[in-house]
Image (cartoon, rainbow, N blue to C red):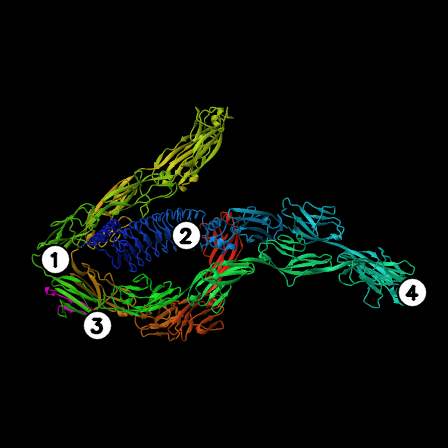
C-alpha cells in the first residue's frame, strides 16, 4: 500500500517569508496525509503504532481501550501518525517543546492525555479542538508561562486538569470557559501573582481548585464568580495580605478553604473574613503576620475585639503647655484600639519638617529638643485605624527668654522696693500672668504689684520676703527667680535691755551680771565682745567670763556676757571685772559697734536667780526628757522649788528638782522658786514632741511592674512628728509633679503616679521623707516596665545536607526578655516534645543549631516565647535533611574513533531531590548546550567526535545533600583521511597537470599514487614530490584515468584513499562542442497561475541532445508541465514552481548548460488587519497593517482616499503612527498592499474625540463709553474643547439681536447707539467641561466732553487686512494688519484661537509694532488660522486669515541615468547610479525584473541610491529598473545587464616580483598578481615546501628573522595551465631584544589539585635567548611542585589556591628582554558541603576520611591554636569564630579530598541616624536604613503591620532606604525597617511626620 508523502524543499536563498506563506498549505497537506494513512490502515484492519512507542489494546467491547505509550523516549515532537482509535496517549517525560494545531488532530476518541514532564513552552490555540472525548489532561512540570485564548477549546468533556508547576504566569480571559464539565483543576506551584476578574467564571461543575504555592498576592473582584459547585479551595503558601470581601461570597457550596502560610494582615478589613470563616466552620484559617501584637497568631483563635476596635486618643497633661526656649518638649498621647491605631503628630494642621533633627517621635510620644519660638502652636495627636480617626490637642507656647531673665537671683535691702522681671516673648494669647512665692499664689495687694510687662514689684521689702518666686502663665511655671533680702547689722539692745550705749555702768561686786548685746541684720550678724580692746576668752578655766548666744530670729542675734566670781560660795563680781566692754556686730554687708565702761561698787546681797535655759524644747518620742530647775542664791538664802500642776504619771521630780519624763509629752511646764518670804521666781518650758520621719519599708527592695503605655503607681507611707514632707528622686534628680508625673494624688498621699509608662521610665525611684529639723528617711522602689512577648523573627523552613549543621532562628522581644524554647513534633503540635541541648544540639540567643544532622532530625519544629506575662507559640516549620548524591557503577574510560557522530558519557547519579549535573572538560567548566549535549539524566553526549574532544571529563552531581564527582576519560583514535585537489581535471593535450594529496588537509606522512590501480613511480614526465604532489608534464591521451592517492600513518591497515579523474582533451577536426542559444531571459518573474516558457536551441557537431532539469532534478511529470524539443512550458504556476530551470546540451565531445531562474509572484495577503479605533485627542494612533506575498508587498496608506505622503511607519511592522492626534485626524484610513502580482486594500474608521478643556476667555470684552448715534462693539474670544457655546446677556437678561443690535457667537455690535443700550453686558462661554463668564459695560451719553466725539472716541477699524495665503514650507511669510481708531488701537495676534505669545512657535515669529507678523521660516506646525485683533477703550475689531502650504509640486525627474544596456564578464563589479529630483522629494527604489532589490549579499544599494554588484555571475543577468516616486508622479529608467562567461585562459603573472633585502623585524610583502580564468590558485614555495602567510596571493612576512633568508617561488595554476616566478629574500641581523613567539593565553582557569604546563618559545634575530620564569613579579621560589622542562616550558603540579596569580616568561639576550604574562585562576574543587557560623560562636567541621589526614584552608595547612583544635574523629573545631575564619576547608587524605566551605555570618545591625523624618505633602521622602551584616541583610519595611511592596508609591533602594513618593497625610506614622539574614534580624523604627 502506498502512502502519499509530501516533500517541500525551500529554494536556496529564498526568504523565510515565502516558507511562512506556505505553512497553511503544509498544514492542510499534513492533515490529509494523516487521514489518508489512517484510512488505509483501517481498511487493512491494522492499527499503526508510531516509532519508538508501545501500543496495546483491550478488545473487550464494554471497556475497549487503545493505549499508545511514548514516554521516556527523548522525543522533541509529537508523533505524526497516531491511530484515531487511541484512547490513552502517554507522551510524558520527553523533550517536547510545543503543541501545534495539527499535532493531535483527529483523536476524537482520546480519553486520557499525559504530557507532563516535558519542555512544553506553548500550546497553540486550537491544539485540543478535536479532543472532544478527553476526560483527563496532565500537563504539569512543563514551561508554559502563558495560556493563550483558545488553548483549551474543544475540551468540553474534561473532568480533571493537572497543570501544577508549569511556570504559569498569566492566562487569557476566559481560557477555562470551554471546561464546562471539569471538576478538578490543579494550578499549584506556579507564578500567577494575580487572579484577574472572571478567571474561572462559568465552570458549573468545578468542585476542587488548587492554587497553593503560586505567589498570589491579590484576588481581583469576580475572579471566583459563578462557581456553584466549588467545595475545596486551597490558597496556602501564597502572598495574600488581604482578601476582598466579595471574593468568596459567591461560593455557596464551599466547605474546605485553606489560607495557611500567607502574609495576612489582621485588621478591620479582615473582620468579614473572620466572620465568614467562623460561619463556614473552617478550622485552618490564615496566620496573622501583622500588626506586630498579632504576629504569628491564627486568625480564628482571636476575638472580634482583637481584630477591630475603634481608636481612642488623649494627650496626657494639661491643655496648655508653656516651655522655655531651648528646653525639651515632651508630649504623650494615649492611643488605643484594634488594630493598634496609627498615631500622627501635627502642629497647626501641618506635619513636621522631616529634615528637622530636633523632632523625634517614639511610638505615641513626641519630643522636640532645643525648642524655638516658632514651635508654638496647637499640637494634634491623631489616631487612625482604617477609615476612623480621632484626635486630641494641646496648646504649646515656647517663650523667648531674653537676657533680662537670665539673672538667677535679685538682691534687695529691707525696707526698699524690689523689682523681679518676667519678660515673655511672645505672650500667650488669653493666658493670665501671675506670681507665686514658695508655691503660694500672690494676691494683688499694696505690697505686691504686677506691671503690664509682667514684672513683680515688692514694696517695703522685709526679711521674710526672701525666697523663690515663680512667674506663672496659664497655670505653668515659666520662670523662677530668687530674691535675696539683706540688712547691714544694727545693735538694737545693749547691756541690760538698753537700746542706747551708756558710757558708764556700775555693778555690785557680788552680783552676776549679764551684759546683753542684741543685733539685727540679715544674714544674722556675728556678735563679738571685746574687753579692753581684746577678744573675751571663754576657754580659760580661770576666766571671769562666760557666754551664751541665742538667735531670736533669722535676722537677730543676742549675745549674753556673764561676769562672775566664785569665792566662799558667794558669786561676786570679780574686782578685775572693771574696764571697757565693746560689742561688735558684723555680717557680709556691714558692722555696728557699741562700747561701755564698767565701774565696780560694793553691792548688797543679790537675789536668787535661775540658770538660764531655752524656753522651747523639742523632745524625741521614746527618749527621756529632763527639764532642769536650778537656782543660784547666796549661801545664807533658803530657796524652795515647786512644779505647777499635778506631776504626769510618766514623769517624776528628781533630787536636783529636775522634772524627768520617761515618755515625753508636749505642753507647758513651770518651775517656781521662792526665797524666804520673798516673791517667787519661775521658769517656763514649752515642750514640742518630735519624731523623726520613718518610712514603712519592705526588704528586699520591692519591684513594681507596669505594662508599657499604662499607668505606674509607686507608694510611700511615712510617719513622724511633725508630719514629714514626701519628695521623690530618680538618679539623684528630684521629680516634680508635672507632665506625666503626679505626686500625692487625691487619697494617696506620698504616692508617685507615672502615666503612659515607657521603657525609659524603668529604674530605681527613691522616696524621701523629711521634716523641719532636717531629719529624713529614704526608701528605694524599683520600677520595671514590662511588655508582653511577641516575635520579631519567625523561624523558616530549611533544608540541609546530611551530617552538616542546620540552624533555625526564632527571635522575640518583651520585658522582661522572654525565654525561648524549641519543640519538635510530627506535625501534630499536641504531640510535640521539647528539644534539649546535647553534644549535637546547641541552643542560645534564639538559635537552634544541630551540628551534625541525620535523617532522624527531619520533622516539624516550633519555638515558644515565655515570660511572666504569657507564652507565644510560633508557626511550625519543617527541617528537611537531604542525603548526598550516589553514583551507580559506570566505566571510567571510553574509547571512540574520530568522526563518530556521537558518543555518550554516562553520569548515573541519583539523590532526592534529583541532583543537578554539571560537566567539566580537562578541569574547565563545560558550557551547555554547544558541541556537547546533556540529557535529562545528566548523561553527556559529544557530537561529531574530533581529536581535541579527548580528555578527562568530570561529572559533578550537586543536590541539597552535597556534591559528588566522577571522572571519565574519553580517548579518540584518529584515522588517516586522504583528499585530492583538484577533485577532477580536464586538460588539453601536451599541457601540464598537478595534483595535491593531503592527509587531514596537511601534508601526509606516508603516501602513494596509483593510476587505475597501478602504482606510479617517477619518470621523465611523472614527478612525485615529497609533500604529496603529483606533476605530469606533456599530458597525452594515455594519461587519462583514475588517479588515487593513498595515505597512512603507523599502521598501513588503516590507510585512506581519495581518487581524482583526469580527462585529456584531444582536438578533432570538424568537431564542434555543444553551445546553447536562447531568447529566454535568465530571470523571470511571473504571477501566480500564469505561464512560464523556457527556450533552448543547441548547436554542435555531432548534434547535441537537450535535457531539462528543475532544481538539479528532472521536472515533475505533471499536466501543467510540457516539454517539446527545445521548449519547457509550465502553466498555472504555483509558488512551488519557483526555482532554477536548466537545459543541458550533450554530445560525445562535451556538455554545456544554460540556467534560468523563475520566481512565481504571489499576490499580497493581509496577515495583520487594522481595526476601527476611537481615541482621545493627543493620544498616539497606531494602525497595524502587514501583508505577505512575493515579492514583498509595498505598504501604502491613504486617508479619505488621499495618499499619505511620507507617513511615519514602524520599521518592523509597517504600522501607521500618528502622534499628537487632533479631531482633524478623524476619517477613513486605508492600508494598500501591492506587488508585481496584485493589489489589495483594507479600510477602517478612526475617530479622534476632542479632549475636554474648560472654556477660557482669550480676549475679553472691553467696557466702552460712546455718544448717541455712534457704533460700538464688544468682542469675546474664547477657547476650550469642545469649542464653547457663547451666550450674551444684558443686565442679567438673555440678549437677542434687534434691528440695530447684532448678536453673534463672538461679539455684540450696536450699530446706532441710544441711551437704552447702556448697561452691563455679559459673555457666557460653556461646554461640557465647564462654564465661564465675563462682564463689560456700554455707556451711551448724549454728548462726549471736549472735542468732537469722532475726534476723541472712535472704535478701531482696519486700514490694511491680510488675506488667506499659501506659502512653501521653509520660506518666509509676512502678514500685514493695520488699524485706526481713537484712542490708537493696540494690535494683537491669535493663532488657532490661542494668544500667539502663549502658543509660541519659537524664534521664527516676530510681531512688530506696526501690526506686521513675520514668520521667518515657515514650518508645518505654523499652518493654520491667524486672527488679528485691534482693540482700544471704545471697542475692538478682528479679522481672520488662513495660512496653508503651497501646492506647487514637481514630478520626479532623473538627474543621473544608468546605461541602457550593459554586458559584463563573470567576476566583474558593476556600479549603476540613479539620482532624481522633484517636490516632494521622491523616493527611489531599485527593482530587478520587477522584484524589489533588498540590498544585501552581492547586490547593495548605497545611501545615494547607487546600485553596486560585486563579483557577478550569470544569475545576476536581468532588467534592472530605477523607479522614482513622490505622490505626484512616477518615473522609470531601466538597464539590461547581461553577464556572460569569461573565456578560459591559463595563469599569467602580470607584475614581476623584485628581490628584497631587509633588517630583521621588518615587514616584507611579495606580490604575485595573476590573471587567468578560472581564477588561478596561488601557492608560494620555499624550495619544495609550501609557505604560509599568503594573503590574497601575496606572501607577507610580518616580522622577518634571519632564518627567513632564501628563495621563494610563486606558483599560479588553473585548469588551463601553470605559471611561476621566483624571488629572493635576504634578512640582515638587527640588534634588538628577543620576542616571544609562543605562550599561553592571557587568562587560564585550572582546577585545584591538577597540573599545568606553561609553554614559552622565544626567538631573536641572531642568537638563542635565555628564558627565566617569575610569579607575581618575583622569581619562583624553589619547590618540588614546579620544574622548567627542556623546551623552557614551566611545569606546575599539585595546584592549590595560592597558585592563583600572574606567571611571567622573560626572554633575554644581550640587547634586552621580552615578557609574556598569563594570569591563572585556580578553580576550587567542587564543595562537598557548606556550613555557616556566626561571629563569636563555635563550629565543628567533619572529616569522613579514614587514615591520616591534613586539614587545609584555601589549600594551605591549618595552623592549630587554643582557638583552632583538631579533635576526635579528625574533626576540626573552631572556637569563637572570627571573620577571618571564612574560607574553604579541605580534609586531605592523600589523594582523597573532602571540602567544606565555612561561611562566617554576622547578625544584622542598623545604624539609626534619626528617629524622626518630616515630609511635606506632594514631596518625596527617603527613610534611611543603613543595615550591615554578613551575608548582606535583606531589608524590608513594615508600616501599619503590613510589609510594604515596591510599587508606584513605595520603592526600596539597593542600600535599604525606603522612598515614599508623593507623600500625603495618610503616609505618616511609624515605619519599621527589618534587616534579616541567616544570622538574625534587626529592627529599627522611624516615625514619618507629614505636614
- The answer to whether marks 1 and 3 mark residues whose Cβ atoms lie closer than 8 Å is no
Could you give the CA–CA distance between mark 3 and mark 2, rounded to whole angstroms? 75 Å
- The answer to whether marks 1 and 4 mark residues whose Cβ atoms lie closer than 8 Å is no
| Foreground: disc 1 or disc 2 | 2
- The answer to whether marks 3 and 2 mark residues whose Cβ atoms lie closer than 8 Å is no
Give the magenta part as a residue range. 1020-1039
Q: Nearer the viewer, residue 746 or 1827?
A: 746
Marks 3 and 4, the one that precedes in the sequence: 4
**Image quadrant where residue 498 sits:** bottom right
Marks 3 and 2, the one that precedes in the sequence: 2
Left or right of 1198 on screen, residue 754: right
Which residue lies under the disc numbered 3? 1051
- Describe the element under mark 4 as helix, strand or loop: loop
Could you give the CA–CA distance between mark 1 and mark 4, rounded to whole angstroms? 189 Å
Could you give the CA–CA distance between mark 1 and mark 3, rounded to whole angstroms? 43 Å
| Foreground: disc 3 or disc 2 | 2
Q: Nearer the viewer, residue 1193 or 1512?
A: 1193
Amino acid at each position: 500500500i502506498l502512502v502519499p508523502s509530501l516533500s517541500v524543499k525551500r529554494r536556496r536563498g529564498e526568504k523565510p517569508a515565502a516558507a511562512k506563506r506556505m505553512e497553511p498549505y503544509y498544514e492542510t497537506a499534513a492533515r490529509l496525509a494523516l487521514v489518508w494513512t489512517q484510512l488505509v490502515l483501517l481498511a487493512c484492519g491494522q492499527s499503526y503504532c508510531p516509532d519508538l512507542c508501545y501500543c496495546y489494546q483491550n478488545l473487550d467491547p464494554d471497556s475497549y481501550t487503545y493505549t499508545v505509550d511514548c514516554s521516556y523516549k527523548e522525543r522533541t515532537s509529537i508523533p505524526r501518525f497516531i491511530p484515531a482509535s487511541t484512547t490513552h496517549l502517554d507522551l510524558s517525560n520527553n523533550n517536547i517543546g510545543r503543541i501545534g494545531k495539527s499535532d493531535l488532530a483527529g483523536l476524537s476518541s482520546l480519553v486520557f492525555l499525559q504530557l507532563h514532564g516535558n519542555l512544553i513552552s506553548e500550546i497553540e490555540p486550537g491544539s485540543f479542538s478535536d479532543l472532544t472525548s478527553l476526560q483527563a489532561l496532565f500537563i504539569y512540570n512543563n514551561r508554559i508561562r502563558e495560556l493563550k485564548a483558545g488553548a483549551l477549546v474543544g475540551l468540553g468533556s474534561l473532568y480533571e486538569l493537572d497543570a501544577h508547576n508549569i511556570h504559569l504566569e498569566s492566562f487569557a480571559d476566559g481560557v477555562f470557559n470551554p471546561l464546562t464539565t471539569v471538576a478538578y483543576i490543579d494550578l499549584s506551584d506556579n507564578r500567577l501573582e494575580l487572579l484577574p476578574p472572571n478567571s474561572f467564571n462559568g465552570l458549573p461543575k468545578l468542585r476542587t481548585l488548587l492554587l497553593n504555592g503560586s505567589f498570589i498576592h491579590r484576588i481581583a473582584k469576580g475572579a471566583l464568580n459563578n462557581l456553584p459547585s466549588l467545595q475545596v479551595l486551597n490558597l496556602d503558601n501564597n502572598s495574600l495580605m488581604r482578601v476582598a470581601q466579595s471574593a468568596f461570597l459567591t461560593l455557596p457550596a464551599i466547605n474546605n478553604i485553606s489560607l495557611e502560610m500567607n502574609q495576612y494582615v489582621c485588621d478591620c478589613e479582615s473582620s468579614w473574613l473572620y466572620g465568614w470563616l467562623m460561619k463556614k466552620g473552617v478550622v485552618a484559617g490564615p496566620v496573622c503576620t501583622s500588626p506586630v501584637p498579632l504576629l504569628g497568631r491564627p486568625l480564628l483563635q482571636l476575638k472580634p475585639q482583637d481584630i477591630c476596635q475603634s481608636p481612642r486618643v488623649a494627650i496626657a497633661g494639661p491643655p496648655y503647655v508653656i516651655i522655655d526656649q531651648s528646653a525639651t518638649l515632651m508630649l504623650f498621647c494615649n492611643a488605643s484600639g484594634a488594630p493598634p491605631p496609627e498615631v500622627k503628630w501635627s502642629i497647626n494642621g501641618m506635619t513636621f519638617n522631616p529634615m528637622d533633627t530636633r523632632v523625634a517621635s517614639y511610638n505615641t510620644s513626641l519630643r522636640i529638643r532645643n525648642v524655638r519660638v516658632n514651635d508654638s502652636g496647637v499640637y494634634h495627636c491623631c489616631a487612625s485605624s482604617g477609615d476612623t480617626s480621632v484626635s486630641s490637642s494641646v496648646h504649646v507656647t515656647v517663650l523667648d527668654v531674653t537676657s533680662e531673665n537670665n539673672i538667677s537671683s535679685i538682691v534687695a535691702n529691707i525696707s526698699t522696693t524690689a523689682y523681679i522681671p518676667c519678660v515673655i516673648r511672645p505672650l500667650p494669647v488669653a493666658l493670665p500672668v501671675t506670681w507665686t512665692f514658695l508655691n503660694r499664689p500672690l494676691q494683688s495687694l499694696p505690697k505686691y504689684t504686677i506691671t503690664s510687662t509682667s514684672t513683680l514689684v515688692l514694696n517695703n521689702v522685709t526679711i521674710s520676703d526672701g525666697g523663690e518666686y515663680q512667674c506663672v502663665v496659664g497655670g505653668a511655671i515659666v520662670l523662677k527667680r530668687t530674691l535675696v533680702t539683706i540688712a547691714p547689722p544694727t545693735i538694737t539692745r545693749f547691756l541690760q535691755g538698753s537700746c542706747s550705749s551708756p558710757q558708764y555702768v556700775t555693778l555690785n561686786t557680788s552680783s552676776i551680771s549679764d551684759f546683753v548685746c542684741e543685733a539685727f541684720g540679715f544674714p544674722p550678724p556675728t556678735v563679738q565682745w571685746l574687753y579692753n580692746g581684746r577678744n573675751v576668752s571663754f576657754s580659760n578655766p580661770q576666766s571671769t567670763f562666760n557666754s551664751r548666744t541665742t538667735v531670736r530670729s533669722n535676722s537677730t542675734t543676742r549675745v549674753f556676757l556673764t561676769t562672775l566670781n566664785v569665792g566662799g560660795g558667794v558669786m561676786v563680781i570679780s574686782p578685775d571685772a572693771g574696764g571697757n566692754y565693746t560689742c561688735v556686730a558684723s555680717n557680709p554687708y556691714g558692722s555696728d559697734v557699741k562700747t561701755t565702761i564698767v565701774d565696780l561698787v560694793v553691792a548688797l546681797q543679790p537675789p536668787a536667780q535661775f540658770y538660764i535655759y531655752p524656753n522651747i524644747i523639742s523632745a524625741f518620742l521614746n527618749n527621756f526628757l529632763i527639764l532642769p530647775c536650778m537656782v543660784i542664791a547666796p549661801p545664807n538664802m533658803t530657796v524652795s522649788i515647786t512644779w505647777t500642776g499635778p506631776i504626769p504619771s510618766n514623769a517624776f521630780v528628781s533630787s536636783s528638782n529636775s522634772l524627768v519624763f520617761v515618755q515625753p509629752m508636749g505642753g507647758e511646764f513651770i518651775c517656781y522658786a521662792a526665797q524666804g518670804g520673798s516673791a517667787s521666781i519661775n521658769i517656763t518650758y514649752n515642750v514640742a514632741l518630735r519624731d523623726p520621719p520613718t518610712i514603712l519599708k519592705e526588704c528586699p527592695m520591692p519591684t513594681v511592674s507596669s505594662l508599657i503605655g499604662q499607668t505606674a503607681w509607686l507608694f510611700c507611707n511615712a510617719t513622724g512628728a511633725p508630719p514629714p514632707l514626701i519628695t521623690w528622686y530618680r538618679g539623684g534628680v528630684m521629680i516634680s509633679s508635672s507632665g506625666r508625673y503626679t505626686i500625692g494624688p487625691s487619697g494617696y498621699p506620698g504616692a508617685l503616679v507615672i502615666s503612659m509608662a515607657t521603657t525609659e521610665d524603668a529604674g530605681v525611684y527613691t522616696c524621701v521623707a523629711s521634716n523641719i529639723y532636717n531629719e529624713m528617711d529614704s526608701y528605694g522602689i524599683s520600677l520595671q516596665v514590662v511588655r508582653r512577648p511577641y516575635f520579631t523573627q519567625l523561624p523558616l523552613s530549611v533544608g540541609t545536607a546530611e551530617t552538616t549543621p542546620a540552624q533555625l532562628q526564632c527571635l522575640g522581644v518583651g520585658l522582661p526578655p522572654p525565654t525561648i524554647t524549641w519543640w519538635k513534633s510530627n506535625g501534630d503540635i499536641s504531640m510535640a516534645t521539647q528539644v534539649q541541648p546535647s553534644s549535637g544540639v546547641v541552643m542560645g540567643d534564639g538559635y537552634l543549631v544541630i551540628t551534625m544532622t541525620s535523617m532522624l532530625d527531619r520533622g516539624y519544629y516550633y519555638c515558644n516565647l515565655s515570660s511572666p506575662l504569657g507564652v507565644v507559640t510560633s508557626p511550625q516549620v519543617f527541617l528537611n535533611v537531604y542525603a548526598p548524591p550516589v553514583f551507580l557503577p559506570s566505566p571510567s574510560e571510553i574509547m571512540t574513533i574520530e568522526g563518530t557522530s556521537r558518543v555518550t558519557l554516562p553520569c548515573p547519579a541519583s539523590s532526592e531531590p534529583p541532583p543537578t549535573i554539571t560537566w567539566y572538560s580537562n578541569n574547565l567548566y563545560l558550557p551547555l548546550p554547544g558541541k556537547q549535549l546533556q540529557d535529562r539524566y545528566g548523561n553527556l553526549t559529544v557530537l561529531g567526535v574530533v581529536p581535541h574532544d579527548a580528555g578527562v571529563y568530570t561529572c559533578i552531581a550537586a543536590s541539597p545533600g552535597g556534591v559528588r564527582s566522577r571522572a571519565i576519560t574519553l580517548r579518540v583514535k584518529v584515522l588517516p583521511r586522504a583528499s585530492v585537489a583538484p577533485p577532477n581535471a580536464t586538460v588539453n593535450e601536451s599541457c601540464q597537470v598537478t595534483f595535491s594529496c593531503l592527509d587531514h588537509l596537511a601534508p601526509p606522512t606516508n603516501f602513494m599514487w596509483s593510476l587505475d590501480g597501478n602504482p606510479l613511480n617517477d619518470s621523465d614526465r611523472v614527478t612525485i614530490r615529497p609533500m604529496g604532489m603529483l606533476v605530469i608534464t606533456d599530458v597525452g591521451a594515455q594519461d587519462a584515468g583514475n588517479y588515487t592517492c593513498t595515505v597512512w600513518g603507523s599502521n598501513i591497515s588503516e590507510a585512506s584513499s581519495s581518487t581524482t579523474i583526469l580527462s585529456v582533451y584531444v582536438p578533432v577536426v570538424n568537431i564542434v562542442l555543444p553551445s546553447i542559444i536562447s531568447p529566454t531571459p535568465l530571470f523571470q518573474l511571473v504571477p501566480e497561475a500564469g505561464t512560464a516558457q523556457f527556450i533552448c536551441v543547441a548547436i554542435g557537431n555531432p548534434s547535441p541532445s537537450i535535457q531539462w532539469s528543475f532544481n538539479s532534478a528532472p521536472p515533475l511529470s505533471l499536466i501543467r508541465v510540457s516539454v517539446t524539443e527545445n521548449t519547457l512550458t509550465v502553466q498555472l504556476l504555483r509558488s512551488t514552481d519557483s526555482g532554477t530551470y536548466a537545459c543541458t546540451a550533450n554530445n560525445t565531445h562535451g556538455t554545456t548548460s544554460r540556467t534560468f531562474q523563475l520566481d512565481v509572484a504571489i499576490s499580497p495577503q493581509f496577515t495583520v488587519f487594522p481595526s476601527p479605533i476611537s481615541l482621545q485627542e493627543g493620544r498616539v494612533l497606531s494602525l497595524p497593517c502587514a501583508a505577505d506575498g512575493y515579492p514583498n508587498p509595498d505598504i501604502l496608506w491613504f486617508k479619505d482616499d488621499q495618499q499619505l505622503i511620507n507617513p511615519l511607519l514602524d520599521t518592523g511592522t509597517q504600522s501607521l503612527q500618528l502622534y499628537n492626534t487632533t479631531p482633524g485626524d478623524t476619517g477613513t484610513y486605508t492600508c494598500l498592499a501591492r506587488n508585481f502580482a496584485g493589489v489589495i486594500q483594507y479600510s477602517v474608521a478612526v475617530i479622534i474625540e476632542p479632549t475636554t478643556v474648560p472654556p477660557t476667555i482669550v480676549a475679553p470684552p472691553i467696557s466702552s463709553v460712546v455718544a448717541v448715534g455712534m457704533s460700538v462693539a464688544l468682542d469675546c474670544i474664547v477657547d476650550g474643547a469642545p469649542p464653547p457655546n457663547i451666550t450674551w446677556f444684558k443686565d442679567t437678561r438673555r440678549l437677542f439681536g434687534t434691528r440695530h443690535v447684532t448678536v453673534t457667537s463672538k461679539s455684540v455690535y450696536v450699530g446706532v447707539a441710544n441711551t437704552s443700550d447702556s448697561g452691563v453686558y455679559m459673555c457666557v462661554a460653556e461646554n461640557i467641561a465647564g462654564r465661564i463668564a465675563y462682564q463689560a459695560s456700554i455707556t451711551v451719553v448724549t454728548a462726549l466732553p471736549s472735542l468732537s466725539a469722532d475726534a476723541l472716541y472712535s472704535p478701531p477699524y482696519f486700514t490694511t487686512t491680510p488675506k488667506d495665503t499659501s506659502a512653501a514650507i521653509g520660506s518666509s511669510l509676512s502678514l500685514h494688519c493695520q488699524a485706526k481708531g481713537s484712542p490708537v488701537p493696540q494690535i494683537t495676534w491669535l493663532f488657532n484661537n490661542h494668544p500667539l505669545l502663549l502658543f509660541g512657535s519659537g524664534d521664527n515669529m516676530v510681531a512688530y509694532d506696526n501690526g506686521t507678523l513675520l514668520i521667518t521660516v515657515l514650518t508645518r506646525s505654523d499652518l493654520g488660522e491667524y486672527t488679528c485683533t485691534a482693540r482700544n477703550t471704545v471697542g475692538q475689531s478682528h479679522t481672520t486669515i488662513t495660512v496653508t502650504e503651497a501646492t506647487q509640486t514637481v514630478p520626479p525627474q532623473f538627474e543621473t541615468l544608468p546605461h541602457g544596456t550593459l554586458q559584463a564578464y563573470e567576476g566583474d563589479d558593476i556600479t549603476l547610479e540613479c539620482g532624481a529630483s522633484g517636490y516632494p522629494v521622491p523616493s527611489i527604489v531599485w527593482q530587478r525584473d520587477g522584484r524589489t532589490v533588498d540590498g544585501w549579499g552581492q547586490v547593495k544599494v548605497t545611501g545615494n541610491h547607487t546600485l553596486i554588484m560585486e563579483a557577478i555571475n550569470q544569475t545576476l543577468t536581468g532588467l534592472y529598473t530605477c523607479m522614482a516616486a513622490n505622490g505626484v508622479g512616477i518615473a522609470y529608467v531601466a538597464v539590461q545587464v547581461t553577464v556572460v562567461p569569461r573565456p578560459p585562459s591559463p595563469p599569467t603573472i602580470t607584475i614581476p616580483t623584485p628581490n628584497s633585502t631587509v633588517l630583521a623585524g621588518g615587514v616584507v610583502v611579495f606580490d604575485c598578481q595573476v590573471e587567468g580564468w578560472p581564477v588561478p590558485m596561488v601557492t608560494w614555495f620555499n624550495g619544495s615546501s609550501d609557505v604560509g602567510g599568503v594573503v590574497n596571493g601575496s606572501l607577507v612576512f610580518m616580522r622577518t628573522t634571519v632564518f627567513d633568508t632564501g628563495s621563494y617561488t610563486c606558483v599560479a595554476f588553473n585548469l588551463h595551465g601553470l605559471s611561476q616566478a621566483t624571488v629572493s629574500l635576504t634578512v640582515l641581523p638587527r640588534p634588538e631584544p628577543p620576542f616571544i613567539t609562543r605562550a599561553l593565553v592571557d587568562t587560564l582557569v585550572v582546577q585545584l589539585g591538577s597540573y599545568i604546563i606553561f609553554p614559552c618559545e622565544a626567538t631573536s634575530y641572531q642568537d638563542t635567548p635565555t628564558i627565566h620564569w617569575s610569579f607575581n613579579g618575583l622569581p619562583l621560589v624553589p619547590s618540588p611542585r614546579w620544574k622548567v622542562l627542556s623546551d623552557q616550558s614551566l611545569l606546575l603540579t599539585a595546584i592549590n589556591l595560592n597558585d592563583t596569580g600572574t606567571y611571567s616568561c622573560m626572554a633575554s639576550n644581550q640587547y634586552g628582554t621580552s615578557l609574556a604574562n598569563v594570569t591563572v585562576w585556580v578553580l576550587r574543587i567542587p564543595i562537598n558541603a557548606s556550613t555557616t557560623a556566626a561571629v563569636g560562636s563555635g563550629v565543628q567541621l567533619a572529616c569522613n576520611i579514614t587514615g591520616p589526614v591534613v586539614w587545609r584552608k584555601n589549600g594551605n595547612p591549618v595552623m592549630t591554636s587554643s582557638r583552632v583544635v583538631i579533635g576526635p574523629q579528625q574533626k576540626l573545631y573552631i572556637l569563637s569564630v572570627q571573620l577571618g575564619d571564612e574560607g574553604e576547608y579541605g580534609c586531605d587524605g592523600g589523594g582523597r579530598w573532602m571540602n567544606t566551605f565555612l561561611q562566617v555570618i554576622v547578625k544584622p545591625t542598623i545604624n539609626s541616624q534619626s528617629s524622626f523624618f518630616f515630609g511635606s505633602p506632594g514631596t518625596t521622602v527617603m527613610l534611611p536604613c543603613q543595615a550591615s551584616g554578613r551575608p548582606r541583610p535583606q531589608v524590608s519595611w513594615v508600616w501599619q503591620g503590613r510589609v510594604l511592596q515596591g510599587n508606584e508609591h513605595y520603592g526600596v533602594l539597593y542600600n535599604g532606604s525606603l522612598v515614599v513618593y508623593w507623600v500625603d497625610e495618610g503616609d505618616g506614622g511609624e515605619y519599621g525597617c527589618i534587616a534579616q539574614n541567616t544570622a538574625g534580624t534587626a529592627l529599627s523604627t522611624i516615625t514619618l511626620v507629614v505636614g
